[in-house]
Each structure stands twice: as C-alpha cells, then as structure tokens.
Image: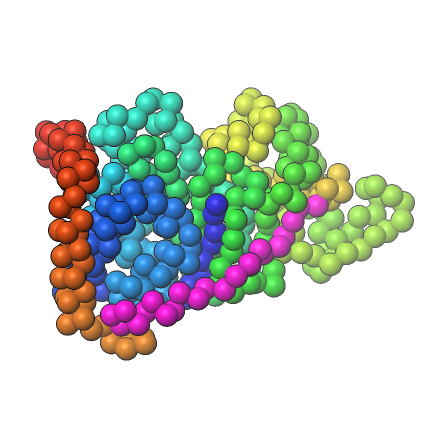
Amino acid sequence: MTGIAELPLHTGHVPRWMLKLMRDLAKNIVEIIVLEHGPETLLQGLLNPLWFQAFNNVIGMDWDSSGSTTVLTGILKDITWKNPELGIVVLGGKGSKSLKVPEEISVISEVYGLTEAKRRELENASRLAAKADTAFFQDGYQLYHHTLIVTEKGSWIVVQQGLNPDARMARRYHIDKLNLLNVHYGVAGTPHSKITLNLSTNDAVKPLKTIIDLSKEPPRKTIKLIYEANSMIQPNILDYAGVRSHTPKHVAVRGYYKPVKPSKHLEKALEALYNESPSKPEELALTRGVGPSTIRALALVSDLIYSVPSPDNDNVTHPIEPYTYAYAVGGKDGIPYPFDSKTARETIEILEYAIREAKLDDKTKLNALKRLRTTLPWWRKHGL
C-alpha cells in the first residue's frame, strides 16, 4: 500500500523550544501506539500519506508545509534511535543524510538480529524506491529527502520527498513494494496537467518490456535509434513519417518528448545494461549508472520507433484533508491558530500518564524490558 502527498514549499525553521515540545508529543504518541498495537501498526500508519500528515499536524507543525516531511521524520529518527525498545527505527533523512542509509542498515541489522538476506532486501528497497521516483516516475520533482523506516521484524517502508522549485511545491512519496509497477497506491495533492513520464503504473507493462528488450541490444545500435527518435521531435509536433508507414502522422508533443543527447554517461549506462541483460523492471532499475536520462531515452525509442508509448498520467486519487488535526495544538505557521505551548504541555502530561498506566500491565512491561535487555548492551557498546 503506497501513496503520494503534495505540499507547498516553505522556508524557515522550527524554534528550539517548539521543537522540544513537538518531540515530546511525538514520543508519547509513538510509545502509546507501540504499547497498544506494536511497531508494525505504527509503520502502517506512517505509510499512509494522510495519516502521516495528520500526525504532523497533531504535534503542531505547519499543516500544509513541505517541512512536515523533514521535521516529522527528523523527530522520529531522533526518538527511535534513542529508544531502541520501541522496535522501529528511521534511517536516512534530508540531503547528505540519505546517503547514510546503507551504513545505518548495517547497524540496525545487527541490533535487530536481521539476516543477511533481509539486509540485502533493505538495501534494494532503498535503492529501488529512489529510482522509482527519479527515473521511472519523472514528474518534475527532484528527490532531496529519503528515509527508510524499519521495524525489529524487518518490515519496512520508504518515505521520500522531491522538490520542484519552479512550482514551489514538494511531493512526498510513500512506498512499501519491492517492485516498480503500481508503486503508488494513492496520490494525494494537486494534480498536474502534464506529467513527464510515468513507468510506475500497471499501464507501463508493454513499454517497460520494450525498454528491457532495447537494453539487450548493442549500445551502438541503441544510440543510433536514439538519434533517429530525436530527429522526429519538432518544436510542437512529432513526425512519424517514414518510420512505420508511408503516410505522414503528426501528433502533439507530450511532456517527456525532449531530445536526449547521447553522451559518455549514457553510453556507459547502455553498456552496463547490455552486460547485465536485465529480465525484469527491478533489475533494470538497480543497474548501476541507469538514471532519468537513460530511461527517458529508451522510452522515446520505445514510443517513436516501435510505437509503444509510455503513460504520462498523474494518478491523484484523493485530496489531502488532515487539516482538522491542526486544531490539536495549533501550528508553527499560525494556522489554524498559533502554536499553543500550554495545551501542548498539558497533552504531553496526559499522554505520559497514559503510558505509565499502560506499562503497569505485567506482560507489556516484561516485553518492553525484554527488548531493552537485548538491545541496550549493543547500543552502549557502540556509544549510541
């Protein structure tokens, strides 16, 4: 089950005093969910883009800000790494922090006692999700935030966000599938009239098959086909004349119809694909060096030379409507009213009381202590 949320791009930062209250609220909410339902339930909540946004609003972050992703995941990362007994942890983050995911996977695999096969699955999940929303779903948003959220059982989801500076918007992507097709279960936000390229839906089966077949061709032949496809792109039309029929056929240029100039990088990517000889989309995506330009070039050839077009739809299925939850303690941006620190502190006290009461149950308490006993020695050993 996956989805997308779209939010306006906001600047600024959260004051330190407010961030502490947000963190305390979030920590108590997380503890109650884990105590009552377990870390797997929390993971499923974070997978839902509307639940994620509602959580963000409850703790007082801007109700419609792009910062909701970076702030909430940052807070959750701090909470989960400092409280390993919760059985759930956030890896990665904004910018350079996203590059630490492989290293953090190794750490958490040792903490949770995950198998080597599960560790490889987590690494592939992270890489595949990043490729899904850069190369295979080219919607004009460049990823700048990537988190992998993992439970003690090895279950995982990816929450990542892309930036479109021209539109001054950010999109958040929620993924839990180790594949590419139908990777977005739902899209929440404002639909665009023109999406560049969407090879992540079930409608992309045929073009992906053609692209995989093209990847097995000698690179020189593919480069020649790319030049041929480029020559068919006019300023406002596509000219199919002389390719598949003797009758000229002119159609309007779509979003992703841009000439792809062959380069050394493209040639190396095609060489890697030729050597790897992928047989399914996931293998295509995980081939080193294959990025947006390579996939767009092969999609162009698929469409213009072999008449197998790629989808360009934006699958918005429901609008973002977690605004009501912003009334809990207000918002950093003053909407629906300024952040109410008094209410936030009272809420934290109530939640902490509820947690203490819940922990009086012997079974729950023993389970929590058991997790502490098995994980804390390792964390202390490594100075975490």
Residue 331 visible from this viewpoint: no
Q: Assign the C terminus to one quadrant of the image.
A: top left
**329 inside magenta stretch:** yes
Which residue shows up at 44% across the image and 66% down it? 321
Where 19 falls versus 112 (above or below)? Answer: below
Front in this rendered view, residue 160 or 288: 160
Where 14 falls versus 233 (above or below)? Answer: below
- Name the colouring of the figure: rainbow
Task: Name which quarter of the figure residue 263 lies in.
Answer: top right
Which residue shows up at 53% across the image and 29% down it? 283
Task: Name which quarter of the figure residue 347 lies in.
Answer: bottom left
Which residue shows up at 55% across the image and 63% down it? 191
- What's drawn in magenta, residue-wise? 309-333
Residue 284 visible from this viewpoint: yes
Task: Name which quarter of the figure residue 114 lies in.
Answer: top left
The percent coordinates of residue 373 (x first, y second) are: 13, 31
Q: Residue 155 vs residue 4: left or right?
A: left
Where 73 falls versus 126 (above or below)? Answer: below
The percent coordinates of residue 7 (x first, y second) are: 42, 63
**360 inside magenta stretch:** no
Front in this rendered view, residue 195 or 330: 330
The percent coordinates of residue 187 (x first, y second) are: 51, 56
Front in this rendered view, residue 341 or 248: 341
Numbered disc total: 0
Which residue shows up at 28% across the image and 57% down it? 71
Residue farthest right in this picture: 246
The percent coordinates of residue 229 (x first, y second) are: 71, 43
Magenta: main secondary structure equals loop
